[in-house]
Every structure is written in structure tokens, then in C-alpha cells.
Image (cartoon, rainbow, N blue to C red):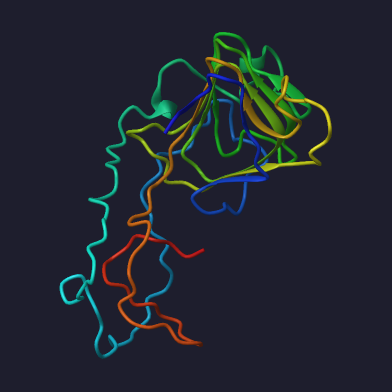
Amino acid sequence: GPLMSSPPLLLLLLFLTLGLLSTSMAQSCSSAGFRDPPATATNNQGPSIATSAPAGLLTQSTASEVVEIYEMAGPDPNPRTDCPWDEPDLQNWHDPATWGGSVPSGGTVTLPANTKVLVSSCSWPVGGYSKIIIPDTSELIFADAPMDLTIRNVLVQGKWRIGSATCKVYSKIKFTFTGGLGGTDEIFTEMGSKGIGGTPGSTIEMHAKQFFPSWVRLGASINPGDNVIWMQRPVNWEVG
């Protein structure tokens, strides 16, 4: 869910990953008006393996329990409504007009005031940026598309948005925060030098595909060399 920063908030991460790691990122968009197509649900569970169920396989209906353990009712719905990337008046990061002339190629970038800027899969240069500042009247919104993005730190005074509570992203988005930790407050006062920092009143909001259930009981013992795990109920987990 969204992280609303009341005291100064710092998410100090070496790697921030939504879902699994993405594999590639284009260096430039085909046009200033490029937008990524709508993402669809996928389930990368690996190749199917033809095998017979082991003798004595336990399921939810056949397992006996000494104690009753709470189980989640089900995954949160994802109706794909109120998607940030579908909002009106978005300005493309890779459009020179957003920046009044030329797209930033690196270094420190401050979003224009009173602007919602959309990052697509091809918007950022491969080398990324050293710092991004989001003013209190602006928003940085990410498309639902595979991305592998490099940054040192981000100062959020406005809004940082990846998906919403009713529109969780399907794509794999990876942020790599570069460089050493350092000994100075490069982001903001008492926020350190590396990661994402939010000032009071800012919003850092990230919603990703939910894997369900978060845990499950084994249906059979696992032995050295096994390449199949039997569980007592279906899951939507992915390889990796």
C-alpha cells in the first residue's frame, strides 16, 4: 500500500524489486508520444513436468491437523481500475516538450512543477540518473512495463506512484541504487546518501502483483535431488 511520510521517511535499499527482476531496457523510445501497451497477467511457473503424484500425497481435504492454523481467505482483487498511467494530462519523460527543450541525459533531474511525468520502458538512459527530485506539486508515475532502472537517490516531496490499490502492476520493475553509502545527507536532512526519501506530506506508493498464498504446507516430503515439490493447495508462485 502507499507509504505516507509524516516524519522524514527513508527507504534505504540496494535493490528494490517489484515481482522478479527484469532483463532488459531499451535505450530510447521510438517517438516522443510512445506509450507502453497495456500489460497482461502472466504466470511464469516454469516448464510442465510430467510426473505421478507420490503415494500418500496430502491435500487440504485429506490432511489431518493437530492444531488449526489460520489461512488467508484469498488474494486482494486486482480489477485494473484507476491505473495511474491512464490518467489524463500525463507528460512523457522521453518527450523533449516535457522539459522545455531536451530530455535529461543523466545527472540530477528535477521534475517540472505542477506536472505528472510518466516513465515508460524506454524513457531512461541505460546509465540512469544520480538524483531525481519530485517537487511537492508534481508526480512521477511508472508504466506497467518491464524496466531495469539505475539511480543513486530520489527525493520525493510530491508523489512517487507505481500502480494503485486497484491496479497492481504485472510487469517486473527493478531499481538499482548505485554507489557507496557515503557519510553525508545527499538526499535530504537526516536521509543519508542512497535510496528513496520522502519529506512530510509526500507519498511513495507501490503496488505489485500479489503471489498467493504466501505460505503453504507440503503435501509430501522433499528429498535431495528432487525437482518437484508437492504442496497441499494450488499456488500462483513463479520461478525465481
Q: What percent of the width, then of the height, locates residue 153?
A: 70, 31
The image shows residue 158 at horizontal and vertical percentages of: 55, 16
| Among the 4 quarters of the image, the one containing residue 236 | bottom left
Please tell me which residue is depicted at 59% across the width and 35% down the height of the picture: 30
Residue found farthest to the left: 61
The image shows residue 20, relative to residue 93, as above or below, that is: below
Q: Is residue 43 above or below residue 62?
A: above
Visible residue check, residue 166: yes
In this figure, what is the number of numbered marks? 0
Q: Is residue 237 left or right of residue 117?
A: left
Instruction: Classify residue 88 as left or right of residue 196.
Output: left
Q: Residue at x 47, y 46 (%)?
A: 171
* Residue at the spot 73% in from the left edge and 19% down from the top edge: 189
Task: Where is residue 102? Give x, y as percent.
Answer: 71, 19
Q: Which residue is farthest right?
A: 183
Q: Residue furthest bottom?
A: 55
Measuring 24% from the left and 87% from the top, which residue is drawn there?
56
Residue 16, x across and y down, in percent: 59, 44
Residue 94 visible: no
